[in-house]
Image (spheres, rainbow, N blue to C red):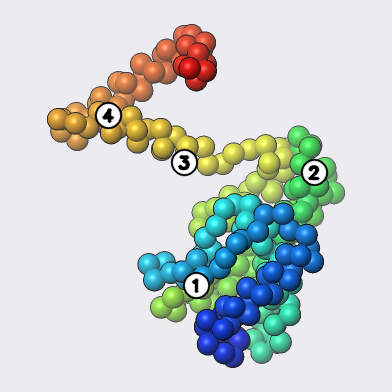
């Protein structure tokens, strides 16, 4: 929004201006994990269906308070509802990260902090939803929600029973990487349904070996 719509110079000049502001805020906030560069393709590539910032999880997490400060600098009330929702989304996201980090040694989030965390999560989700609805009909929608947003709210609802930092909601992504390698080894010279049967058989054998003698698995890892 800043680079393409709200700042008055060319896209390249606007991007450079924002990047300069990011450097200032990185130093002011003593940010540990920093982007080393920023290009238009990193958040608005030609193949992207909507605006989405690329980067490592640590880089994205650490830039949120930075972007919040920059947004407040340039937010002038020209689009009051949009600007307010962007500010809310950025602020509550940063506050959730800060609260989770402050209670990161706990098995559960303490009651008062858990209530605050849930309030931030609901505010964040509502603000993001309003932004998503506003831009939904654009050719290049600026805000898109995925199932992860829904999962965040549920993780915060359960935070008084299990700290979100102790739960990994996407173990399936790791499983997909493993099963892909196994499937590739079963796909040569057979039909797709035969390959599926081979994958299942090999996986069952591997699980049998693992649960029968876990030391076999750990010995393999050591080797």
Viewed as shown, does residue 8 lie left or right of 162? left
Name the residue rendered at 25%, 24% in the picture. 198
* Residues at marks 4 and 3, CA–CA distance in whole angstroms: 19 Å
Q: What residue sits right under mark 2 in the picture?
A: 103
The picture places residue 18, in percent across and down from the top left corner, at: 63, 76
Q: Classify the position of the N terminus by image quarter.
A: bottom right
Q: Tag 4: Cα neighbours inside 10 Å, few (<14), some, or many (≥20)?
A: few
Would residue 82 be visible to someone looking at this image?
no
Mark 2 neighbour class, 10 Å CA radius: few under 14, some 14 to 19, many 20 or more: some
Front disc: 2 or 4: 4
Up the image or down, 207 lies above or below 39; here it is above
Q: Which residue is mark 4?
A: 185
CA gap, disc 2 and disc 1: 36 Å
Cα distance between the residues tagged 4 and 1: 39 Å
Question: SS for tag 4?
Answer: helix
Q: Identify the mark nearer the N-term, 4 or 3.
A: 3
Q: Which mark is residue 173?
A: 3
| Gap in angstroms between the C-alphas marked 3 and 2 | 26 Å
Report the residue marked by disc 1: 40
The residue under the point 51% across, 70% down is 39
Residue 167 point in image, percent of width and height: 63, 38
Q: Which mark is residue 196?
A: none
* Left or right for 158, reference 221: right
Q: Earlier in the sequence, mark 1 or mark 3?
A: 1
Camera-nearest residue between 182 and 34: 34
- Mark 2 and mark 1 in contact? Answer it, CB < 8 Å: no
- Of mark 4 and mark 1, the one earlier in the sequence is 1
Earlier residue among tags 2 and 1: 1
Q: Nearer the viewer, mark 2 or mark 1?
A: 1
**Count of labels shown?**
4
Question: At 37% across and 67% down in the image, what residue appears?
Answer: 47
């Amino acid at each position: 929004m800043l680079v393409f719509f709200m700042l008055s110079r060319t896209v390249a000049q606007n991007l450079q201006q924002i990047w300069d502001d990011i450097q200032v805020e990185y130093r002011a906030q003593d940010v540990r994990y920093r982007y080393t560069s920023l290009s238009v393709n990193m958040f608005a590539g030609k193949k992207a269906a909507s605006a989405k910032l690329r980067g490592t999880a640590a880089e994205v997490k650490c830039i949120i308070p930075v972007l919040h400060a920059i947004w407040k600098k340039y937010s002038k009330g020209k689009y009051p509802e949009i600007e307010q929702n962007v500010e809310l989304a950025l602020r509550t996201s940063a506050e959730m990260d800060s609260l989770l980090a402050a209670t990161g040694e706990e098995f559960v989030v303490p009651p008062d902090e858990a209530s605050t965390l849930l309030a931030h999560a609901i505010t964040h989700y509502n603000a993001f939803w309003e932004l998503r609805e506003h831009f939904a009909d654009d050719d290049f929608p600026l805000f898109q929600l995925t199932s992860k947003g829904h999962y965040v709210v549920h993780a915060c609802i359960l935070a008084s029973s299990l700290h979100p930092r102790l739960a990994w909601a996407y173990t399936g992504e790791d499983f997909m990487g493993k099963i892909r390698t196994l499937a590739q080894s079963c796909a040569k010279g057979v039909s797709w349904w035969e390959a599926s049967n081979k994958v299942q058989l090999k996986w069952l054998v591997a699980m049998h070996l693992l649960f029968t003698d876990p030391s076999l698995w750990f010995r393999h890892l050591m080797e």
